[in-house]
Amino acid sequence: HHARLDNEARELVEMGFRRPGTVCVLCSTSTLSAGVNLPCSRVVITSCQDYGDKGWQFLKSTRYRQMSGRAGRTGLCSQGESILCVENDTEKRKAEEMMRALPEPLCSHLGEAAPHA
């Protein structure tokens, strides 16, 4: 499930995932995880690193919550499970801190004029 799928292919994948026994695993990039609204019971995040404006960085708590929140969606599943893979004790410590941290403040840009190119 990625940005280069056309709408028809994306619909086929998503229909297969919703139909029991057809598509049992859905893999997505971290950016697309926000747009995947499918009932799942488990999310596996395979890396604590995320690529953004400043290159590779440790996951921010807001991004982690957005990705892990795909599991156990209200009205779709009664519960969910999120697994975050870490490679060493340093990543484990940082991951524990990140999970306990308050989400970063959000700043809406809705209603602002788009920049002219």
Image: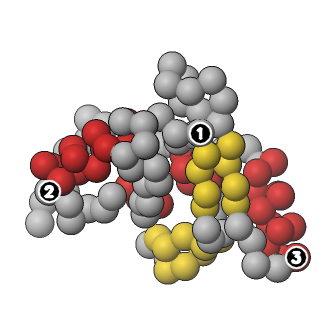
Q: Earlier in the sequence, mark 1 or mark 2?
A: 2
Q: How is the image coloured?
A: secondary structure
Residue 89: assigned label: 3
> Would residue 86 be found to the left or right of residue 104 on screen?
right
Q: Earlier in the sequence, mark 1 or mark 3?
A: 1
Residue drawn at x 28%, y 50% is 13
Vertical position of residue 87 compared to residue 59: above or below = below
Question: Which residue position holds label 2?
Answer: 6
Residue drawn at x 67%, y 48% is 82
Name the amino acid, label 2.
Asp
Q: Are marks 2 and 3 in contact (CB under 8 Å)?
A: no
Among the 4 quarters of the image, the one containing residue 27: bottom left
Residue drawn at x 26%, y 62% is 3
| Residue reaching furthest to the front | 21
Q: Secondary structure at mark 1?
A: loop
What distance separates the C-alpha of mark 2 from that of mark 3?
41 Å
Residue 41: assigned label: 1
- Asked whether residue 75 appears in the rendered view, the answer is yes
